[in-house]
Amino acid sequence: MQLKQLPEEFKQALPILTTITTAGFEAYFVGGSVRDTILNKPIHDVDIASSAYPAEVKNLFKKTVDTGIQHGTVMILDHGNGYEVTTFRTESGYQDYRRPDQVTFVRSLAEDLMRRDFTINALAMNAEGIITDLFGGLTDLKNHVIKAVGDPTARFHEDALRMMRAVRFSSQLNFQIETKTKQAIASQSELLTKIAMERIHEEFVKLMLGQAANQGVEQLISTNLYQYLPGLNEQVAKLQPLVQQKFELANENQVWSFLAMTLKISVQQISGWLKQWKTANKTVKDVTTMVQLLMVMEKQTVSNWDLYVAGKQNVVDALAVSQWLAMPYQPELIQEYDQLMITQKNQLTISGKELMQYQVVTAGPMLGKVLSYLEQQVVAGNLPNESESLVTAAKKYVQEK
Ligand code: ATP
Ligand code: MG
């Protein structure tokens, strides 16, 4: 197969390939970008594989960065773009089910393609657009199949993360996992316990953001991988709502709050649950806020204060999630948010300092209480955000206390 029209990203990278090949080495585009181009999907990073050793690559270009030199990867900086060039390599060892004990640089493309995970990820393309396909990847792309390169049992034994990757690609591309590949996952799913949660996390979020995410969850169940995923590992019955209907999520916060609502993980449990997943602290905070808001949306009228506390992005995300849950859709909440008198405490026209100057209150715990009261009243729309009204209301509040 030869691609006649290369996407712009490849055209820009062509001089890199020709510099390497003119020097007498081989160089190819490899991995996800080749796969996605054949599928007519937009591509992100353009990865290059070459027979040149890292030192030889570095000799050919002015600006390079050693991004992963011990694995054979050198980044070439070219007109503001960065291209990773990785020397053809083989891997061996894998005594810990996750990382090769040794990588060996080789001069043969075939050996490099052999170490790659799935046939659709083991395609290489040269500067003329000619595709090298040693494992039937083009047919599998056409038939929408995820199939391990070589013996699937051995490949998942080498690196157990590949099992999550199989399901992740199935969700992202809406492909089926080939029978033997799937059976090998099902029989070795327990090896996932050897893999760092950070890496499982990355694949899982990509899976949940995929176009066929409900199919992805279904595969997690039928391969038993779900048993090793925090919060999903309790009862299969609880996962059924995720399988039965399609859902489309746009970011990680949406993923976790959708899951918390569907799996009935309470607000109090969220932090412990997400810590197991090793999410960022900010994610824990946002998801907790979103779930709190979604619980109100489910049962009661959302107040200005609820919106204010959540913040705009969490309101937008919670609304997006709500359409996949059994609750009324309330797009008017965005407008209501935009009409809030203030969105942050420091937008109050009066400060603590001024309240003291006007002798409404002295420094101490009462000052904080007065400011919180004013904040709530302004957000609720009970008080205009202007100093005279705020001072009067503050005086009244202090007297009544
Ligand atoms: P994405 O679109 O998510 O970037 P990708 O296929 O480019 O998809 P990467 O994780 O960026 O995935 O990896 C680039 C390539 O490296 C893959 O296409 C595959 O050939 C190879 N690869 C990545 N991870 C593994 C792995 N765990 N085992 C074997 N090969 C892998
Ligand atoms: Mg990639």
Image (cartoon, rainbow, N blue to C red):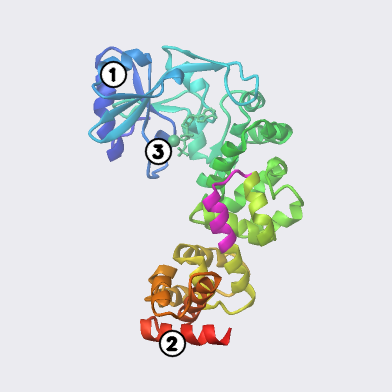
Gap in Å between the C-alphas at discs 2 and 3?
A: 69 Å
Quarter holding the N terminus is: top left
Relative to 373, say whether 33 is above or below: above
User: Which sits in the foreground, 183 or 3?
Assistant: 183
Q: Residues within 10 Å of mark 1 (few under 14, many from 20)?
A: many
**Above or below, 321 relative to 151:** below
Q: Secondary structure at mark 2?
A: helix
Regarding residue 400, the answer to whether it shows in the image is yes
- Going from N to C along the chain, the mark reached first, 1 or 3, is 1
Q: Which of the marked residues, 2 or 1, is nearer the chain's N terminus?
A: 1
Which residue corresponds to the image point at 43% horizontal and 79% vertical from the top-left?
Answer: 359
Is residue 53 covered in magenta? no
> Mark 2 = which residue?
392
Residue type at mark 3 is Ile
Q: Position of residue 120 (x, y in %)?
A: 49, 33
**Gap in angstroms between the C-alphas marked 2 and 1:** 76 Å
Coordinates of residue 152 in the picture (x, y in percent): 63, 27
Q: Nearer the viewer, mark 2 or mark 1?
A: 2
Magenta region, residue range: 277-289
**Mark 2 near mark 3, Cβ–Cβ under 8 Å?**
no
Callout 3 environment at 10 Å: few (<14), some (14 to 19), or many (20+)?
few
- Amino acid carrying label 2: it is Thr
For mark 3, what is the residue? 38
Instruction: Give the label on residue 20, or none.
Output: 1
